[in-house]
Structures are given as C-alpha cells and as structure tokens.
Amino acid sequence: MIQTKQQRFTESINEAIGQRAHEDTPQLFSYTEKIAGVDQISPIAVFQNTQSFKGSRIFWTSPEDEVTLIGLGSVYSFNGTEDTNSNRFKQVHSNWKKMLNSIYVDNPYKHPGTGPVFMGGFSFNPEESSQLWRNYSNTQMTLPEYLITIDKNEAFLTYHVWLDKELDIEDSSCAFVKMLETIKRETKHAHNPLAIMNQQAINADEWKRTVKKATGTIENNVMEKVVLARELRVSFNRNIPVSYVLENLLEQQKQSYIFAIESEDDCFIGATPERLVKVENRHLLSTCLAGTSPRGKTLKEDERLGKQLLDDDKNRMEHAFVVDMIKQAVEACSVKVQVPESPVLYKLRNLQHLYTPVQGVLKEGHSILEVVRRLHPTPAMGGVPRDKALTFIQQEENLSRGWYSAPIGWMDAMDNGEFAVAIRSGLIQGDEASLFAGCGIVRDSDAEKEFQETEIKFLPMLMALGGLQ
Ligand SMILES: C=C(O[C@@H]1C=C(C(=O)O)C=C[C@H]1O)C(=O)O
Ligand SMILES: [Mg+2]
C-alpha cells in the first residue's frame, strides 16, 4: 500500500519535472492523495501531532457541513502591500491567478478544498497597524506545505513542494508518506486546566461613553448604525496551549466556525458563527447575523427570550441594515438571489442571534474575493453608511482590531472557497490573551445594555480558555 503510494508520487513528480519550462524558472508541484479510513482521523489529533509546524499552522472547521482544513507550513505566502480595502482583495486575486499558472497540479479528486488552496485572512482596517498585532500582516494568504481536508466521509492530503535544485525526490516522497501516517496518529495527552490570574477590561467606562456619543451622532443623522468593539486582556498561570483551546471550542461551539491561525509566536483563535461568503460550484451563500439575546436557563425562558428578540424593534433594525447591504452586494455579482422576508433565530451555546441567509449563483467571471471585497465590512462589523461609520470607529473606538471582525478563510484553484468574519475570537500571546467583542449601535441603543451584550459575547472564548464552567 505504502509502496504503491510512494510509486504514484514519484511518477507524478517526475512527470512534473519533465514538463517544467526551465530548471531556473520557479515552479511548484501540488499533489493530492485520498486518505483511507476517515473515521480514524481526528482534526485535533492532527493539530497536536504536528507541533513541528508550530507558528505556521491554520485550522478551520465550518459548522453545519463540518469541512475541516488544516494547513501546515508554507511554501508560498502573500503579504499584501495595498492599503486600501478594495485594492488588497484585487491584489490577492491577481496574485493567486498568477501563482496558479505556474503550479503543476496532480489532483484527480477535484474535491472542494483540495489541491492548491490559499488560506489566511485580512485585518479589519488595511490602514491600521499596531504593536499588539505585530505578527499579523494586513493581508496574509498562504499556500501550505501540507493541507489536510476532511469532508464528511472523505479525507485528502495535499502536498506542495518547489521543483528546484534543492529538491530530493526520495526525501519528498518519504516526507509525504510519513505525513499520511502522522495524520492517523492518536492524541496523547490530557491538559491541566488553565487558571485566570488577571482579567482587565480595557477602557470599559470610556467604551460606554463612546456608545453614548455614537447614539448622539445617530440622532444628528450623521449615520444610522455603527459597530463598536472592546478588548478584554486576560492573563493565565501558564502558557496557553492552542490545542487545548481548540479542543474546547470544537466541543462547546458546534454551531460556529472554529479557527486558529498561528503566526510566529501568536495565535488568533475563535469560534465565529458568522459566514461572510461561501462559494461551491458557483453556488453562493452569505449570512446576515445581527441582533442578540442571551440563551434562557430553561427551555421556556429560552423560547421567551427568542420570541422577544424576534419581536424587538431595536434588534430588528440592527439586523435590517445588514440584510439590505448584503442583498445589494450579492446582487451585484450573482443571479437568482434569494433572501427570506424575515429573520429566524440562530442559537449558539451562550447566545442567540437574528439570522437571514442570502443565496445566489455567482456570475461568470466573478470570484469569491470580489464578493469579499464588496461585503467587507458589512454593517454587522462596520455600520451604515459605511464610510461615516468607519470614520467614527477609527476616531472613537480606541482599539486595535487587527484581524478581529475581518475576513478569514480559504479559496481553491477551482474557484470554491469560504470566508467567515472573525468574531468571538482572541489573540493568544504566551500566557496572555486579548479577547474582542462588539455590538451594533443604533438610535435606540442603551450604553449599559450594549455593554452587557459584549459581556456575553466574551463567554465563548472565556469558556474555551477554561475561565468559566
Ligand atoms: C461584533 C460582534 O457581533 C456582531 C454584532 C451583533 C449584535 O450587535 O447584535 C450580532 C452579531 C454580530 O454581527 C461580536 O461578536 O464581536
Ligand atoms: Mg446587538
């Protein structure tokens, strides 16, 4: 079995070398193999058993259909230089298309999320830079050395290697086969729980004053909605093991995307319920998620809170701004757009939201990144009108958002992909973490209530860090 695999690999790489334009022209080889026995693969075990790639791993699991992508290492990374929002997505798109032209791809499976896949994310604001987010570029997309794709009953391993003078075919084929074995290794350890030593809400009172200022600005008809966020800096008794937090998030937040993006010594991690856009075989799905209530302690209370949320004018208003804008953006690049008349509830472990899906079929010649470019930031993260709200955020929020509330995700060579909005998230730095939470401020917002809303939005991350039971 192993021998056949090695043989197919060697034949393929030799074929790629034979077809290479010139020895001095850089060329990548992309090779995908199906992995037998998907039930023996645990995503968290894969993460734990690949410590040698620490600092350059990307973990991604989507909620309902549970597609898992794990990227290890990097053979090519694109760090954008464009500082306008619109240009950076265009820049990534053209860079990716150019890149794909020089990759020899052996992927007989053509399954979404296999073969060459660009993974990573963006900052909320391309013009912002800060000490806190020093290890994350404003645009950072990576072609991983290894990519493990798990989709329901199928799993795949994709491997990338440069066909250059340093290439040793024997070494490469051994490394590939070794990774096939590593993927199926069991997890070994149980973690000791973490203890919170200190927890500091950054500028909490100032944040409430800013909310009041925002409602004042809304009353003066300068804008209609703005999303304001704040930071909680938490320190622990020891270094935070990423796989421990990841394991907890996977267990506790099943309705969310679970992600971890390592960069050098830091890790941006979270459980976001918010899909920005998914494209599979040109079918497009986006999500409007805004309007929030806690979960009830009993079924009865939960249903009462849910009904209250559905009937609440203030929350419906927060939500409607998002639906209007996403519908417009999706219509600009899709046909057959479908949007339900009214929202339904989307229930998470710690809270519930108003939810409206937006579907369509992406027009020929349009890419997922174009949809991201049109959508980011939606009024669920920025506001309405966008420019007024962004100016308010920039001038008043007093926070380095970094990658919080920004698009993260992946795209493949077949124009499939998925991006989520990175909320319910935190930046892990050694034994400390910065957690972020925000909420939509509209005319009827009350500063104290909005503050409480951000408190419950910290819960998913606090729970996963072991700070709450
Ligand atoms: C900004 C966040 O969440 C957003 C704000 C919401 C609201 O104000 O009701 C709900 C979901 C998200 O669109 C966050 O969780 O940090
Ligand atoms: Mg809200």
Image (cartoon, helix red, strand yellow):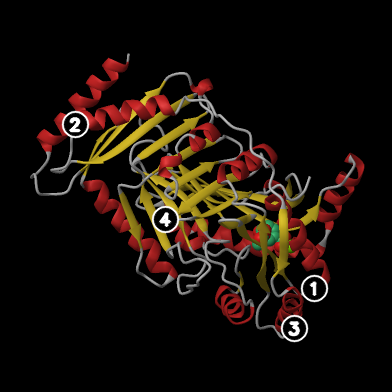
Q: Pointer 4: what residue?
A: 369
Q: Amino acid at mark 1?
A: Ala
Q: Is residue 188 left or right of residue 87?
A: right
Which residue is rendered at x = 69% and y = 71% of the image? Answer: 202
Numbered badge on residue 137: none
Across and down, in percent, residue 71 comes to 42, 42
Q: Quadrant of ligand 2?
A: bottom right
Give the residue at mark 2: 169
Horizontal arrangement in the rendering, residue 120 relative to residue 414 (left or right): right
Secondary structure under tag 4 reads: helix
Residue at image mark 1: 447
Instruction: Determine the residue positioned at 45% across, 27% down.
Output: 155
Q: Residues within 10 Å of mark 3 (few under 14, many from 20)?
A: some
The residue sitting at 47% across, 73% down in the picture is 129
Determine the secondary structure under disc 2.
helix
Which element is circle 1 on?
A: helix
Per the model, the C-alpha gap separating discs 1 and 3 is 12 Å
Q: Earlier in the sequence, mark 1 or mark 3?
A: 3
Q: Which residue is mark 3?
A: 216
Is 42 located above or below residue 206 in the figure? above
Q: Earlier in the sequence, mark 1 or mark 4?
A: 4
